Amino acid sequence: MFKKTAIIALVMMLVAGVGQAFAYSAQMQTFSDVKDDWATNSIYKLSAIGVIAGTGDGKFQGNGVLTREAFVKMLMASISETSAASKAMKLQDMTDPSRWSYNYVQRAYDLGLIQFMIANDQFKPSSEITREEVAVLTGSLLLQSKSDVERTAWKDTGFKVEADNRKFVDAAAINPTYQAELYYSSSLGIMVGDQTGEFRPKASLTRKEAAAIIERVINERIKGQTLSGIGYYAIESFKQAGQMSLLNDVKFGWSTLSYPAAGTASLDMKKGEYAVPSGWEAAIQIADQNKVKQELNIFANNKDNQLSKFLTDLPAQTAFIQSVQTAMKNDPYGFGFTGISIDFEGLKDQAEQPAFVSFLQELKKSLDGFTLSVAVPPTDWYKGYNLKSIGAIADQVILMAYDYTHLESKLPSAPLPLVNEAIQTALKDIPKEKLVLGISKQANQWISRPDGTVVSEQPAIKLVEDRIAKPGTKVEFAVPYFLSKITFQDDRGNHEIWYEDGKSIEAKIWLAKFYGLQGVSLWYMGNYTSADYDVVKQNTTKR
């Protein structure tokens, strides 16, 4: 699934000249002044989703203090959904709509969050924000998700219990008017006292403190987010067939598009890597026992432009659709599939969009009640996919947000900032309720050989796991990619492996929850380890 390696042209632009360099629209480099800090992961997570940015010259300046408007900007940027219609702010010091913070302050005003900070029709956006104000802002935002009854109970008595439990040394310095919201933030662990037991309500807030706080707010907001687990059962997956118990939906990769000649095409379930395997009955039985939705995945790539040719060959398309329709209705194997999943890869030309959309429309019409899911790549490089039209036709869209791998730059398959960009692009056209984030369990290896040459490989997961356990192997979880980096030396040279493990999978699931997507998909089930499935179990909802 999405097996081709690509240079993503608009995300990664080659700069001509000696010693090629790369520029990214996402934050793909580390900040020079953020090294193993307690807030490092928060800083880079928020950077990946565009909530925070550096201050220039490759620095973050985590110890710098924040203004009111800067924190409000961060808080509002961390809310992925839109707000209600704007109200007139009537603030003497926020009258210029072109001010960089104006829209964020307006949104916070619309939500009723900043009114307590306004005096004499002034917000004082450039003033340093205090810890007390941050606690009230975050507490107010999170209280809005509660019912009227719950909010009333908290404001009447609940906060008093929290205040008694916390016993801040400097509690008397907290403005009594703000206590309900401030202590609500405290009760959730968003803002708590320091090691001395002080809350320091009038102290300023640093940029790195803000990053940690905003991540906690996001985590609190998404902790109840339901997320479906979708598995691709293909290649060698039987060893993990029992993990279907964790999933809601399984795509069985047991068929391909056969297009041997002009005018003729069919569904092929007997030949090649994606043929129906012997012993298939056991896998279907496990799926039935676990009551998972089951679709037949149909794979095709554009080798030698065969897929592009097929999409201009209407007789072949008609024959293929009839073949699919017959297979689904007659069900010669007795699968009992409830739908099909189309995984047609490698369309790079924008001019191919209408043909692919037309094919999907005709296919959908023929399915007569069967569901249709469609896999799509990031469209920076593969421009043959009209996401808006595909989103309208399909019941579910799988975003294959990976295979950004590039030899010269040593860019691995799925760095978190690029995965985020792919999601943001897709959400412009596809409803989040239909969108599934595809995660590919893989490793990307670069070998710097003694003769100075560099080669790349994609090692098997078992070999990577074995290497991790060997002496002399260094493993670190590296930002901003949010992937495990494995380094070692042997007689072949110096090795660098970027690896999708449980921790990196969890970061991608965090993205899917942040955007409220339907779910995450696992390509392919047999590659995932028991530790990976533990992460999936903890973060998805079995319906």
Image (tube, helix red, strand yellow):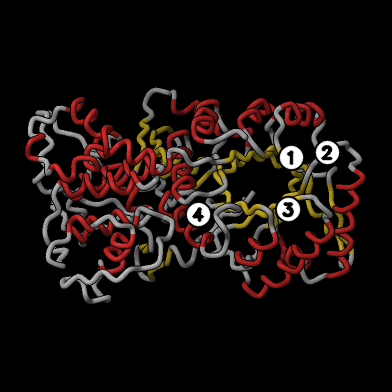
Q: Which of 25 and 68 is in front in this view?
A: 68
Q: Residue at label 2?
A: 336
N-term mark: 3 or 4:
3
Say what secondary structure mark 4 lies in: loop
Circle nearer the viewer, 2 or 4: 2
**Residue 297 vertical position relative to residue 114 in the rendered view, above or below:** above
**Residue 13 vertical position relative to residue 330 in the rendered view, above or below:** below
N-term mark: 1 or 3:
1
Residue neighbourhood size for the residue with mark 2, other residues' Cα within 10 Å, grouped as few (<14), some (14–19), many (≥20)? some
Q: Residue at label 1?
A: 294
Q: Which amino acid, by three-letter code, is at mark 3? A: Leu
Q: Do the residues labelled 3 and 2 touch (CB within 8 Å)?
A: no
**Distance of label 3 from label 4 (alpha carbons):** 26 Å
Q: Residue at label 3?
A: 372
Residue 79, percent across and down?
A: 38, 54
**Distance of label 2 from label 1 (alpha carbons):** 8 Å
N-term mark: 4 or 1:
1
N-term mark: 3 or 2:
2
Q: Are marks 2 and 4 in contact (CB under 8 Å)?
A: no
Where residue 243 sits, quadrant-wise, is top right
Circle nearer the viewer, 3 or 4: 3
Residue neighbourhood size for the residue with mark 1, other residues' Cα within 10 Å, grouped as few (<14), some (14–19), many (≥20)? many
